[in-house]
Image: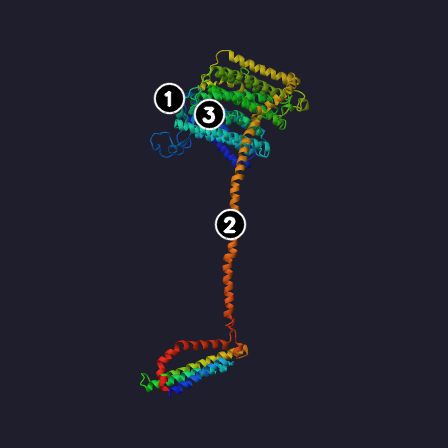
Amino acid sequence: MIGFAWLIPLFPLAGAIVLGTLGRRFGERAVGAIAIAAVAGSLIVSALAVAEYAGSQHHGAAVAVGDGFPASFEWIPGGAARTSADGIASAPVAGGLSIRWSYSVDALTCVMLLVVTGVGLLIHVFATAYMRGDPGFARFFAYLNLFMFSMLVLVMAANFPVLFVGWEGVGLCSYLLIGFWYERDAASDAAKKAFVANRIGDAGFLLGIFGAFAVFGSMDFETIARVIGTGDIVPDALGEWGVLSVIVLGLFVGVAGKSAQIPLFVWLPDAMQGPTPVSALIHAATMVTAGIYLMARVHGVLLAAPSAMLVIACVGAVTALVAGLAATAQDDIKKVLAYSTVSQLGLMALACGAGAFGTAIFHVMTHAFFKALLFLGAGAIIIALHHEQSLSRMGGLARRMPVVCATMCIGALAIAGVPPTSGFFSKDAMLIGVLESTVLPLPLRTALFFVGLVVAALTAYYTTRMIGMAFFARGSDHDEAHGGKLSVPATMTVPLVVLAVLSVFGGLFDVGHWLAIGTVVTHAGWMVPALATVAAVSGIGLGWWLTVVRPGAGRAISLRLGPVREAAAGAFGFDAAAGVVPVGATLSLARAAMLADVEVVDRAVNSTAAGTVSGAGGSNWTDANVVDGIVRGTGEATVSGSLVFRAMQSGRFAGTSLVLAMAVAAIVVAFGWNAAVAAFGHWFGGGQ
Amino acid sequence: MLTTVLTISGLMFALGVAGVLTRRNIIVIFMAIELILNAANLNFVAFSRYWASIGGISPHTGEVFAVFVMVVAAAEAAVGLGLVIALYRNRGTVSVDDIDLLKW
């Protein structure tokens, strides 16, 4: 079925087109059925393709999907290749650039395909219940299917341009879905914030792509990997900042935008303004992991730039720590999960920076299971409590919604990394990957390992705090004393149960080992698992004690930590800085531009206008006195001259004929006299 | 002989011109114009006879001219009197002093 893998993104695309154009005419059941069927089609084809790939001899190698339209075709045709005039530069130029739209399937794509389509299907099912009665039901599923299309293009792309189409497509769908309830100011603001933060990242990403094209002469992932494999490209040493490092940093700026790393992570907590299934699918399970996927996809380039990897690891660690601390201070259940996502993405970036790409993808997978589970559970609570998101007003829900409680507890154990859940294996693998990194220098990787442990403990703490406050704390508005069981439809519970099962057993699929990219982690030794377990258990214990056993003590500590807690809740100023720094810079730039406008442009304009006005005054004077004078003078001269001549025109016969007679007489006198004398003089003389 | 005739002719012409210039009645002015034309006729005839007496090339040319002039004068009088009648019907006068439409 690999030959038919090009069908995978087309199902959701068809679904998006049908729902986007005709969706409003269908009922909710039909819309939901179309959307779910589209994703289910993708899942089935994906599963068949993955089965064929896993059973074949291709292990590790990429397989191109099909040949010829629509699986593979020339997308942006180029002209003939040319070299520069001196003949030296053989780097490809735009004339020789020919971009094919093509997919390829390798182990990494297989993992992502199953995660995206599998989790995507469950969330689509859940969303049919969550979005019931919303006037934008069809629009929601059109967007969601469009997102699935973009995400599948992203993970199946065989080259950078196709990947970038998917990358921008998921960004667009993220924007559309965060702002789904656009009549709310907060939602549309959050959508814009996400869009802008992602555009900043995309600028770096594009520069990275251009750099990669300039250096490797191709944008195909396979060709890039082959070029690196030949050894023609000299890798940078640690501490050396060559062009490869710059390329990787450019790509990482894109990763930071999409996968919410410092300093571009600020959009993700705000993105919780979108409907909860969107938060689960896009802002936890799939889209935000696109950056991690990208780093794994081009891991060869990253490994050739260890300086940049060090930066990535450090940024990832700081992100994980900052977001983990921020998550402990949130009151909105979705914000807890959002900061938790940022923190987990930081851990994945840390693992990528350490060179353990396979473990990062492993964590992408397990995180998709348990974070989707936690988000969907939170969505079930939010719907059951009529859009109540504040943790401090929940509590005592364990008896009122037992299935949700049980599945979310499993998700919490998984994200906390309690053995033997999936989270334990993947987090453990990442921590070992950091500790045994061949990229990072020794003291640093030990330090980062302990940061990872602290983050693991924090994760366990804030998740337990969330679960405790929502389900087990007493004396709040929604305690069981205030009502009976809350009904949760099967379309919600089934995905929760399936995800809970995956969260527990997902760790059995050690995809890190199967992918075999970067550092391959083998679970040997007991020290790291033991430390991780101690961290998880202590975090859980602390969280449970402070929220359920002694909630008063928890509140007292919270009060005493006042300013620190405030800072943590605002992610230590990053959120505010994200508003202040770019906005302030833009404002001062605008002020400088205004000053230049007022002082230079306006003055030039004003003086031009003044010059024109005075010139016009002179022109006006000339016109009034010279030109008009000539015109009027002509007229007046004509009038006064005519006074003389018109006096002659009496119109009387006598006067006119007298003048005539006198004129004839004058002519006769003037001309005729001499002639008459000459002709007849002798005769006159002779006659007389 | 010729001198006498030309003198008479000149006097007639002068009388005609004086009549045209001084009289007010269009009919009388017409009559004065006839006088001018006949002064010219007299000249034609006189010179014709004079040329014939000194051996001129074409006898009776002047007489023929005089006849032509008389014909034209008759036609002119017919047209002119028609105009005068039309004028009288329109304006109720034949005095040239009252017919001054051509003035500014």
What amino acid does circle 1 point to?
Gly
Callout 1: chain: A
Q: Is residue A38 visible?
A: no
State yes or no: discs 1 and 2 in contact (Cβ < 8 Å).
no
Q: Is residue A56 above or below residue A21?
A: above
Q: Which mark is nearer the camera, 3 or 2? A: 2
Disc 2 chain ID: A
Q: Residues at marks 3 and 2, common chain?
A: yes
Q: In the image, residue B78 lies at what x, y percent?
A: 46, 81
**In terms of sequence position, does the residue under pointer 3 or pointer 2 come before the other?**
3
Q: Secondary structure at mark 1?
A: loop
Query: How many marks on residues?
Result: 3
Disc 3 and disc 2 in contact, CB within 8 angstroms:
no
Circle nearer the viewer, 1 or 2: 2
Q: Which mark is residue A615?
A: 2
**Foreground: disc 3 or disc 1:** 3
